[in-house]
Image (tube, grey):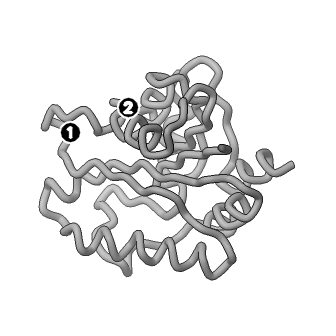
Amino acid sequence: MKLLILDRDGVINHDSDAYIKTLDEWIPLPGAVDAIARLSKAGWTVAVATNQSGLARGYYDLAALEAMHTRLRQLVAEQGGELGLIVHCPHGPDDGCACRKPKPGMLLQIAAHYRVSLSGVWFVGDSSGDLEAARAVDCQPILVKTGKGERTLAKPLPAGTLVFDDLAAVAAQLLH
């Protein structure tokens, strides 16, 4: 199985320091939906692991989150692709859970769902927490410059981190 795991906010859609709270605020980044669809059509399984502390903070509810993910699936399907498992962490930063990145709980959940090893699987994110979660389970950390990526690039990166402009550039590399 060819598995690719993506962070959501800042990788697939625009991010906001004020959180993405409604379907109207959920706006795909240029080329991201097309990238997922092209990867899917080429035999890749694309999964998503996303911290959603806005749930714990009461900024939006599970129905709003599900509406965003339904829209993402629809957009990918309209381009002939399919999006795999989407897992989210509903906890706040101080809840002490095992799923919130930089902890690797969501990545382990994806591995268990697909019954695969995560060794060498590309995990694409825009934050240090994403890269640390990838490293914790032997995924290949990939940083995109979208979202918080430029800010993250200014900090030391985990050894072996690959850097791309955006998700479309990641897809182009994997499909080349």
Residue 135 rendering spot, x and y as whole percentages: 50, 23
Q: Residue at x 58, y 31 (%)?
A: 141
Q: Residue at x 52, y 59 (%)?
A: 84
Question: In the image, which disc is placed on residue 93?
Answer: 1
Dot 2 crowding, Cα within 10 Å, few <14, some 14–19, many 20+: many
Q: Nearer the viewer, residue 99 or 131?
A: 99
Indicate which label's residue lies in the foreground, 1 or 2: 2
- In the image, residue 161 sits, relative to residue 4, either above or below, namely above
Question: In the image, which disc is placed on residue 80?
Answer: none
Q: Is residue 84 left or right of residue 45?
A: left
Q: Residue at x 36, y 78 (%)?
A: 23
Q: Nearer the viewer, residue 85 or 140?
A: 85
**Disc 2 element:** loop
**Disc 1 element:** loop
Q: Is residue 6 left or right of residue 97?
A: right
Q: Nearer the viewer, residue 149 or 171?
A: 171
Question: In the image, which disc is placed on residue 104?
Answer: 2
Identify which amino acid the numbered label 2 is placed on: Pro
- In the image, residue 64 sits, relative to residue 18, either above or below, namely below
Residue 175 rendering spot, x and y as whole percentages: 81, 51
Dot 1 crowding, Cα within 10 Å, few <14, some 14–19, many 20+: few
Q: Residue furthest top?
A: 159
Q: Earlier in the sequence, mark 1 or mark 2?
A: 1
Q: CA distance from mark 1 to mark 2?
A: 14 Å
The reply to whether discs 1 and 2 touch (Cβ–Cβ < 8 Å) is no
Q: Is residue 60 left or right of residue 34?
A: left
Quarter of the picture holding the N terminus: top right
Q: Residue furthest front?
A: 115
Q: Residue at x 68, y 69 (%)?
A: 34
Identify which amino acid the numbered label 1 is placed on: Pro
